[in-house]
Image: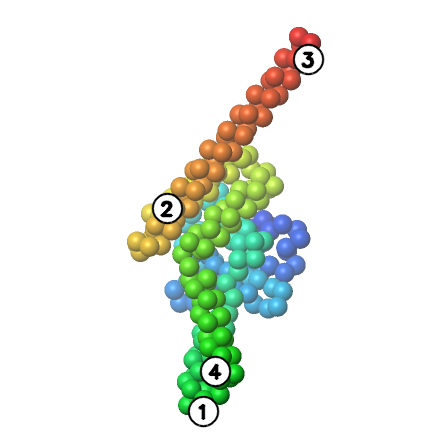
Amino acid sequence: MSELQRLKGLLPPEMQSWVFVEAAASTDPALISLEEIGRDEVEIQLDLEKWDELALDHRNLLFWHEVGRIQNDAIPRDGWEMAALAIGLGGAIGELWVQDGLLLVLAVGLSGFAGYRLYLKNNSEKRLRDAIAADERAIGLATRFGYTLPNAYKSLGGALKDRIEQTRKKRQRSFFEDRLEALRKSAGRARAEMAQQQGSRSSVASENVYG
């Protein structure tokens, strides 16, 4: 079985008909990325040469992170905002020339909306929040496919450490470091909840024995 076929089998059954896994075709691809290829179809693209160097568990959790992004509807889409911004600014300048107030307001409004959309798309805080939410999804998917909760956290943590070590750009490395810190906090909360649940079960058992 090829790696692409193996990963296809790690998709939830409800996603297998519209999510595809392919080798990246660009000259300098990202390790793993998403692309919307149709109205209701998404492709997960891999740099297989770099991908195969990672440990199996790390590959699985990085893959489920991308699946989590799809589930959270955090898929990068073709940007129309720059075109709208250019049209709006061009229209505003034109309407200033002909002094048409209503069309000027519409052009400025279009420019403002497109600019706001660009801000949201490029906002680093939102990008980090989306990534952390996808990490939580990845943990859930891992347990769905047979991982214990501690092993799921350990595998994703190891994968993020790999990304930190392999990333040269400071801003991108900081992005992975922030994700790793959030994952550690999440693991701590999960550990506390498990301990509380185990304590509750022990308490119930004691009541049954001595009740």
Q: Position of residue 155 (x, y in %)?
A: 47, 40
Give the residue pinned by disc 3: 208
**Residue at position x 47%, y 48% from top?**
132
Helix, strand or loop at mark 1? helix
Q: Circle 3 sits in a helix, a strand or a loop, which is it?
A: helix
Residue ID at (51%, 33%): 190
Marks 3/1: CA–CA distance: 86 Å
* Residue 1 in view: no
Task: Evaluate if marks 3 and 4 touch, with contact meaning CB atoms under 8 Å apart.
Answer: no
Quarter of the image where one finds residue 94: bottom left
Circle 2 residues within 10 Å: few <14, some 14–19, many ≥20? some
Residue linked to disc 2: 177
Q: Which residue is mark 1?
A: 98
Where is residue 108 drawn, in percent x and y? 46, 77
Counting from the top left corner in percent of width and height, residue 68 is at 55, 51
> In whole angstroms, how far apart are the C-alphas of marks 1 and 4?
10 Å
Residue flagged by tag 1: what amino acid is it?
Val
Confirm or deny contact between disc 3 and disc 2 (CB under 8 A): no
Q: Quadrant of the C terminus?
A: top right
Mark 3 vs 1, N-terminal side: 1
Q: Which residue is mark 4?
A: 104
x, y percent for residue 130: 49, 53
